[in-house]
Every structure is written in structure tokens, then in C-alpha cells.
Image (cartoon, grey):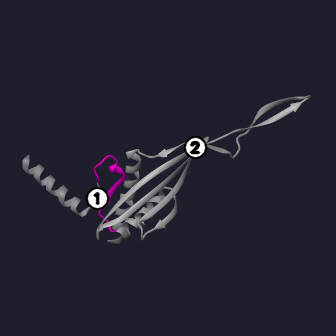
Amino acid sequence: MKIIFLLAAFWVNVLMADTPSTAVNEGNEGYKQREIMYSVDELFEGLKKTLMQSKMNIVTVTKENGVITARGDQYNKDTITEITVSISFKPVTPTTSSVGMIASYNVMEKKANTGQVGFAGISLPIPVPLTGRYAMIGSGHINDSAWYQGFYNSLDKILFEEKMKSL
């Protein structure tokens, strides 16, 4: 039984040595940054593809400074949630890069207008159907580790697929 366990552990280590992986940095908000075993060029292309597949619009890209910002909207029945993401990346070694991300949100709610109806000197307010007017009802930073983990999982998948295409 002990030999089977040692052989299984050996094969896991052998298989994992050839598989690109990520390591989450420790710390209070370590889930927002990590080191990835890809070059900075591969990471840059992977970040752009991940953002586009996430239906985010890339606002600024400065590869030389290692910064990408993107914005996307999520539409619900009466609200719009606007998400803004800022990503920084830099090379650590020729085959390893560091990536960090912060995200914030604004929630806007559709507002109804009122109009006036009157006759014989009496005026009553009546609701007018919803128009295109929105009012901000909330904003803040996204501090949900599952949200960041979802983004990094998508990035890992894209980077792995691109690596397999190049082999």
C-alpha cells in the first residue's frame, strides 16, 4: 500500500512539473495577485483574451508599463452594474510573470419620472413609464475572493489552451 502511494505521489509530481500552474500570494488580499508560470508576452495576450471573453471593453493598454484597464456592464431588470478592472503585470523571470488586479463597481437604478395631469384647476402627479434616467445607488470595491478566482481560472484556461496550440 505504501509503495502504491509513493508511486502515485511521484506521478502527480511528474505530471504537474509539465503543467503550467499558478501560485496565490499569501496575505490579507492575496487572492488579488499571483505569479504565473508564463512569459509576460504570453500573459499580456492571455489577459486581453480573458477580458474580451468576459465581455469587458478594454479602455487602456500600456504594455510597456504593464497596465490594462477594462470596463463592462451587467444589466438586470431595473439596475445596471458597471464593473471597472485595473490589472498590472510584470516579468519576474523570463518564464514567470506577476499579475495583480483590483476591481470596483457602480450600481445604477432606473428611475421613473412623474408628470402632471390637470383640469379644472386641479393638478395630479402621475407616474410616467420608465425612461432612460438612472441614479447611482451604490459603489465600492470588489473584495470577493471567488470573483477574482473565477477571473484567474478563466485566464489559466486561456493561457493553457494557447500553450497547447503552440506545441
> How many marks can you see?
2
Q: Is residue 74 left or right of residue 65?
A: right
The region drawn magenta spans 24-39
Where residue 127 sits: x, y (%)? 75, 34
Identify which residue, 79 or 1, lies in the foreground. 79
Going by the numbered disc 1, the residue's amino acid type is Ser
Outermost residue, right side: 120
* Mark 1 touches mark 2? (CB < 8 Å): no
Identify which residue, 44 or 33, lies in the foreground. 33
Q: Which residue occupies 37% across, 50% down?
A: 149
Q: Which residue occupies 47% across, 59% down?
A: 51
Q: Label 1 belongs to which residue?
A: 21
Q: Is residue 148 magenta?
A: no
Local SS, label 2: loop
Instruction: Answer few, some or many: residues within 10 Å of disc 1's Cα (few below 14, many 20 plus, some between 14 and 19).
Output: few
Q: Quadrant of the C terminus?
A: bottom left
Q: Would you identify the image quadrant in which residue 154 lies?
A: bottom left
Where residue 26 sits: x, y (%)? 28, 50
Q: Would you identify the image quadrant in which residue 113 lies?
A: top right
Q: Would you identify the image quadrant in which residue 20 lies?
A: bottom left
Q: CA distance from mark 1 to mark 2?
A: 35 Å
Q: Is residue 32 magenta?
A: yes
Going by the numbered disc 2, the residue's amino acid type is Asn
Q: Label 2 belongs to which residue?
A: 76
Q: Which residue occupies 40% across, 64% down?
A: 46
Instruction: Answer few, some or many: residues within 10 Å of disc 2's Cα (few below 14, many 20 plus, some between 14 and 19).
Output: few
